[in-house]
Image (tube, rainbow, N blue to C red):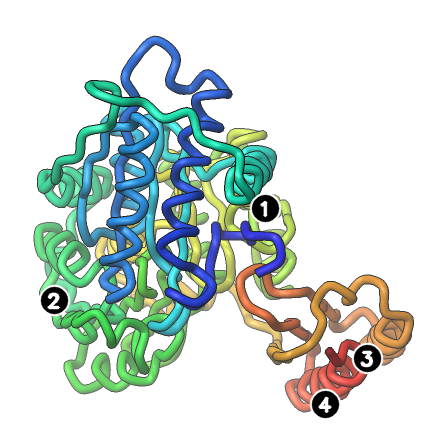
């Protein structure tokens, strides 16, 4: 698997790349590293463990729980809940560690492990590096220091987590959602019960699709990576909007009443103006990644707001937000972080706040989202290439330079290796869609030839 930790935890094909042995070993290593860092000092440590509905999550959860308990950590099993719920509960319960088993938007055969430190924040890079090093050291033979007797961790189910999380979501809304009809696509994932419950309690009339997880159908033709079913359902039910989550519900994308997509950039633009109106947008600044549409940047400038851009990955957005105490940030893909109420992207919270803005203003989502014009943007994923050579290939560097000269000031090019999948992403933005597509396809061909494995 190369380096185990990517931009969003450890991820791979369950029972092939991500095995029970690996899950157990990483959990023991995480416990030892946090103990080494002083996190557990003076008290008996506790961890919150949750998962999405994937079938493989059942055995991986067992492995993680066993690893933590064997290292002397008490475990609260919260069951199937969204990633942001595990992050929230880690903070709310004063736990020393949170663990979420999910591969987010990936297909069902994949799974992943995300660790949260005390307070519910993702682990810093240096802690992940240390966990990986400790895991490797012990995997190759060094014995663990194991507690015995009363020193081993105890395990219990914590069913109250569902209610705590839903109550938290509804408590932070600035206004109710009465009068709105909303279609929710839950991607047969972790929010299949949480999200409809929260929207209903907030006053919305809710229609659900993709809310019958069976362990095998997560993200299968539905959710934030496949908006077709949501578009059709919104139009069919004459709904005011549709909300789509991914498998672990840390993302939110939307569809307006006409069936048109509303992406993460547009959602952030709507929320930024709403938060400024409530004096909740600190420093009048939004944090986004380099993948955000140029139209988003122009819209923020036009509205008198500042935009800070980071590397791709919501962890880098969050780091920038925490460093400067910014309140709103996120990604075009729908990871939106509202730092006053969440420590990571929270798709349900984002959807609730978006709907609250519609209810408060009486305007349609189409109208609200028109605050920004999306410039044509083409993204091509190039699989089965050596993503490690993106920054060193002279052939690729020359092709990018040629493309940038052709686009001039009206567009841009971005090539980056995926942090979670074995592919390279080619993104081209231009004033004209045909030009963006032509340049992107040409660059994708160069990536295939220059980075062939």
Q: Quadrant of residue 210?
A: bottom left
For label 3, the SS is helix
Estimate how packed mark 3 is, as few (under 14), some (14 to 19) or many (20 or more) residues with alpha carbons within 10 Å. some
Disc nearer the start of the sequence (1/3): 1
Disc nearer the start of the sequence (2/3): 2
Q: Is residue 410 above or below residue 57?
A: below
Q: Position of residue 171 (x, y in %)?
A: 18, 38
For disc 2, the marked residue is 206
For disc 4, the marked residue is 438
* In this picture, residue 220 sits left or right of residue 435: left
Q: Measure how far apart labels 1 and 3 are at the Cα level.
A: 42 Å
Q: Nearer the viewer, residue 86 or 215?
A: 215
The residue located at (74%, 69%) in the rendering is 412
Q: Is residue 251 above or below residue 221?
A: above
Marks 4/3 in contact by CB < 8 Å: the verdict is no
Q: Nearer the viewer, residue 367 or 444?
A: 444
The residue located at (34%, 42%) in the rendering is 99
């Amino acid at each position: 698997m190369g380096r185990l930790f990517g931009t969003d935890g450890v991820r791979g094909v369950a029972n092939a790349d991500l095995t029970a042995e690996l899950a157990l070993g990483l959990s023991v290593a995480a416990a030892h590293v946090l103990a080494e860092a002083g996190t557990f000092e003076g008290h008996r440590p506790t961890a919150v463990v949750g998962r999405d509905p994937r079938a493989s999550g059942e055995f991986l959860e067992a492995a993680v729980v066993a690893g933590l308990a064997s290292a002397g950590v008490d475990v609260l099993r919260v069951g199937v809940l969204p990633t942001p719920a595990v992050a929230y509960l880690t903070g709310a319960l004063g736990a020393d560690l949170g663990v979420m088993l999910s591969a987010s938007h990936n297909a069902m055969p994949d799974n992943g492990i995300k660790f949260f430190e005390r307070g519910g924040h993702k682990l810093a890079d240096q802690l992940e590096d240390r966990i990986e090093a400790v895991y490797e050291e012990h995997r190759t033979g060094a014995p663990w220091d194991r507690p015995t007797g009363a020193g081993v961790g105890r395990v219990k189910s914590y069913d109250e987590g569902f209610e705590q999380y839903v109550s938290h979501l509804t408590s932070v809304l600035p206004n109710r959602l009465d009068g709105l009809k909303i279609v929710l696509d839950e991607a047969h994932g972790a929010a299949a019960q949480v999200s409809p419950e929260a929207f209903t309690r907030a006053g919305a009339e809710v229609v659900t699709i993709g809310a019958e997880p069976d362990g095998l159908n997560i993200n299968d033709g539905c959710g934030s990576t496949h908006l077709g079913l949501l578009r059709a359902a919104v139009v069919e039910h004459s709904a005011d909007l549709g909300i789509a989550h991914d498998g672990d519900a840390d993302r939110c994308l939307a569809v307006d009443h006409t069936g048109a997509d509303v992406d993460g950039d547009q959602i952030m633009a709507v929320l930024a103006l709403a938060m400024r109106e409530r004096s909740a947008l600190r420093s009048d600044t939004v944090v986004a990644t380099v993948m955000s549409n140029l139209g988003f940047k122009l819209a923020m400038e036009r509205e008198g707001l500042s935009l800070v851009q980071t590397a791709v990955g919501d962890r880098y957005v969050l780091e920038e937000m925490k460093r400067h105490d910014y309140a709103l940030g996120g990604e075009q893909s729908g990871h939106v972080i509202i730092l006053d109420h969440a420590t990571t992207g929270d798709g349900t919270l984002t959807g609730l706040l978006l709907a609250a803005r519609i209810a408060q203003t009486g305007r349609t989502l189409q109208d609200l989202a028109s605050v920004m014009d999306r410039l044509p943007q083409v993204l091509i994923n190039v699989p089965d290439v050596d993503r490690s050579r993106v920054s060193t290939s002279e052939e690729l560097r020359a092709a990018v330079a040629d493309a940038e000269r052709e686009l001039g000031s009206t567009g841009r090019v971005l090539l980056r290796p995926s942090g979670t999948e074995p592919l390279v992403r080619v993104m081209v933005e231009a004033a004209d869609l045909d030009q963006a597509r032509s340049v992107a396809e040409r660059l994708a061909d160069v990536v295939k030839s220059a980075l062939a494995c």
